[in-house]
Image (spheres, rainbow, N blue to C red):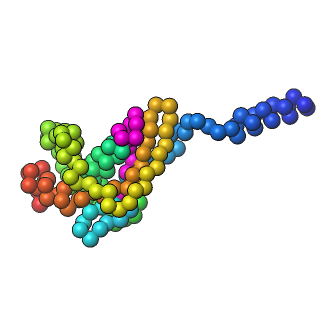
């Protein structure tokens, strides 16, 4: 009986101790709608991962824009558009050079985001990555106008 009691105590000591690593599989990292502004912009909670804070936040920005462009926003409030700006399922491949430049070259994508709505930042980490959630405003109307001008989408 002492052996069983000792094992239970040892188990409790080790299981109650603080754990250094979070299991990131338990978190939902989908882009969420927090609201839509009168100018047509969408306020989102977006997530990104990277090797450090800067990389993770940059990836969260890109993920938010990618979702507005190609997926639509399906989580959170129903205010945001479920319909992506680019509805052609092959548009990313057809316009690969355009979108590669958009997301990489001189951070063109950053013209279509704003941090006006707040500073939500949440951090989760493991041994191999760091994940940040941020509040970001995607300037959807401005982005749509540019895509029309660049002949990526039709009016």
Is residue 77 on the magenta stretch? no
Query: Residue visible at 78% across and 32% down?
Result: 10
Q: Quadrant of the C terminus?
A: bottom left
Picture coordinates of residue 30, whole percent (x, y):
40, 50
Residue 70 placement, left or right of 117: left
Question: Residue 42 sits in which quadrant?
Answer: bottom left
**Whether residue 19 is visible:** yes
Front residue of this view, candidates 76 and 60: 60
Q: Relative to 131, is 6 above or below?
A: above
Question: Residue 59 sits in which quadrant?
Answer: top left
Front residue of this view, candidates 27 and 116: 116
Picture coordinates of residue 20, whole percent (x, y):
58, 36
Segment colored magenta: 44-56
**Whether residue 82 is visible:** no
Query: Residue visible at 9% across and 51% down?
Result: 150
Q: Relative to 14, is 150 above or below?
A: below
Picture coordinates of residue 94, whole percent (x, y):
14, 40
């Amino acid at each position: 009986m002492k052996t069983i009691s000792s094992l239970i105590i040892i188990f409790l000591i080790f299981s109650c101790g603080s754990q250094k690593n979070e299991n990131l599989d338990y978190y939902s990292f989908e882009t969420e709608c927090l609201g839509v502004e009168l100018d047509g912009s969408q306020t989102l909670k977006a997530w990104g991962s990277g090797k450090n804070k800067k990389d993770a936040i940059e990836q969260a920005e890109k993920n938010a824009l990618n979702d507005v462009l190609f997926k639509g926003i399906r989580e959170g409030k129903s205010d945001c558009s479920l319909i992506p700006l680019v509805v052609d399922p092959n548009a990313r491949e057809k316009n690969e050079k355009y979108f590669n430049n958009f997301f990489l070259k001189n951070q063109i994508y950053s013209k279509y985001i704003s941090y006006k709505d707040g500073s939500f930042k949440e951090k989760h980490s493991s041994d191999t990555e760091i994940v940040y959630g941020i509040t970001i405003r995607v300037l959807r109307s401005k982005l749509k106008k540019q895509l029309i001008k660049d002949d990526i989408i039709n009016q």
